[in-house]
Amino acid sequence: MQSHRKNPVVVVLGATGTGKSKLAVDLAAEFNGEVISADSMQVYKGLDILTNKVTEEEMKDVPHHMISVVDHRTKFDVTNFRNMALPIVENLHKENKIPVIVGGTNYYIESLIWKILIDKTEDHSASESGKRLKLDEGIETISKSNEILAILLENSGNLEPNILLPWSNSEIHSALELVDPARAKKFHPNDRRKIIRSLQVFYQTGRTHSDLLIEQSKHSPADGGGTGGTDEPPRKAHLGGPLRFENVICLWIQVPNDILETRIYKRVDEMRERGLRQELEEHMDFLGPDSNIVFTEGLLQSIGFKEFEDYLHLQPDERKSEKGDKLFLEGAQRLQLVTRQYARKQLKWIRQRFLRSSRRQVPPVYWVDGSQKDPTSWENNVTSVAVQILKAYLSNDSTNPILKEKLVPEPEKPFEDDLLARSCPVCDNRILLGTEQWEMHLGSYKHKKMAAKKRKLAQQTEETNVHRKADIVN
């Protein structure tokens, strides 16, 4: 007799617009579970339409956690999220309930199911005691000679919001190169948030982020996560930390790109019909006429708010004018564009973080077809199939054919461990991350055209120099 899996954790994956929240509710209702939202903007109170929070009606009496729990002025990051959400998972397990994690913020999901965060309280940071860490004399000298590093040194890695705003992304990236060059090579200069985090880790712990991550990977168990009842052997985890829970299962709602793009456009239109314009105006007016409002902090960094920045900076009476209508429409169009781009990033994240198992210990991922959203198709192709998969997984029924049929296979080409940033001197030092991007760039039409142009220019220059030398000789 198969033993039932203990303390399972269900994760619903998919790009924005695929219906993740609906499936999470369906599964929680079916399996005595509760939903945990993993969305960095939905944790804040306000802007319910813009952040696409589930309505009371859509919740269907299923308890939801981590939605509207933080004031919009509160600084809230992935560590805060993990520290608030993990006890919820643990309490649900004690009550024999299943936590269903769903949301669009990838690193929030990762913080719950993998042991990946380097927490300053676990790293013996001196910042809590008010004492500055004693660093190597050479590092101290370097830090004091760089304005960015000097701020981090003085504050033991703790930063006030916006304190680094005066410095560009490239300047902050250059600062990381001074103290942790190995980590800096992993980032594009525009990865500002990640770069700052690595700087903070160094000045909070006295150790480079790259060294800590290497040490963390050595402590990962040799075997990967369960294979969902298949006969494949467990896989080794090289990077990324171990899974936090033994029985994690992921359900991925897959939707063709053309259908997904249509849904995204339609969803923005529906947001407008539900009162998006009024919601944005009310929130902006609530903030007050503050010219120092930063659209990259807290709730204001939501996808959508900064896209309407030009419109929101109008005076209230101007917003009702023809100019206001025009700027609002332009904002809505930008929102559609950035949401499409965000959906692509989410899909890339799923493939790189869940399917490239040579890099880390991964849970099994199963797919369901979410291409049709009418009630009948959704029930037959999404909810019903997901319920069958989850029942088979929970009962440890390795003979159930649905586990093999719906298991997402590993890609034929393994994910490239080399994620170093490379600069292309031919294309104005454009930065590419990893071998895959680098090789694609070298084979691109744009690169080849630029290379040919520079070769031709170099040849012309050489011929000119030859003629000049000949003239001098003559």
Image (spheres, rainbow, N blue to C red):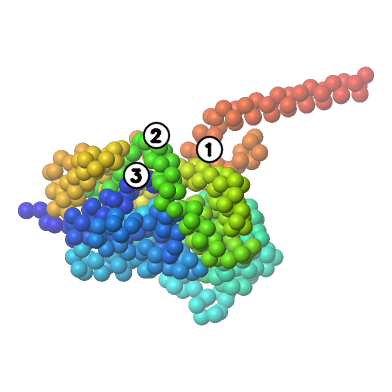
Callout 1 secondary element: helix
Q: Label 3 vs label 2: CA separation?
A: 12 Å
Is 178 placed above or below 75 here? above
Q: Which image quarter: residue 242?
A: bottom left
> Disc 2 marks which residue?
258
Please give the name of the residue rendered at 84% of the width and 21% of the height, measured from the top-left corner. 467
Q: Using the image, tell me which numbered label, if any, was put on residue 422.
A: none
Task: Give the amino acid at mark 1.
Answer: Trp
Secondary structure at badge 2 equals helix
The residue under label 3 is 18
Task: Please report whichever mark, 3 or 2, sits nearer to the chain's N-terminal start.
Answer: 3
The residue carrying mark 1 is 438
Q: Amino acid at mark 2?
A: Asp
Find residue 421 and report its horizontal and vertical position in percent.
55, 46
Q: Are marks 3 and 2 in contact (CB under 8 Å)?
A: no
Q: Residue furthest top?
A: 474
For the residues marked 2 and 1, what is the alpha-carbon distance in whole angstroms?
27 Å
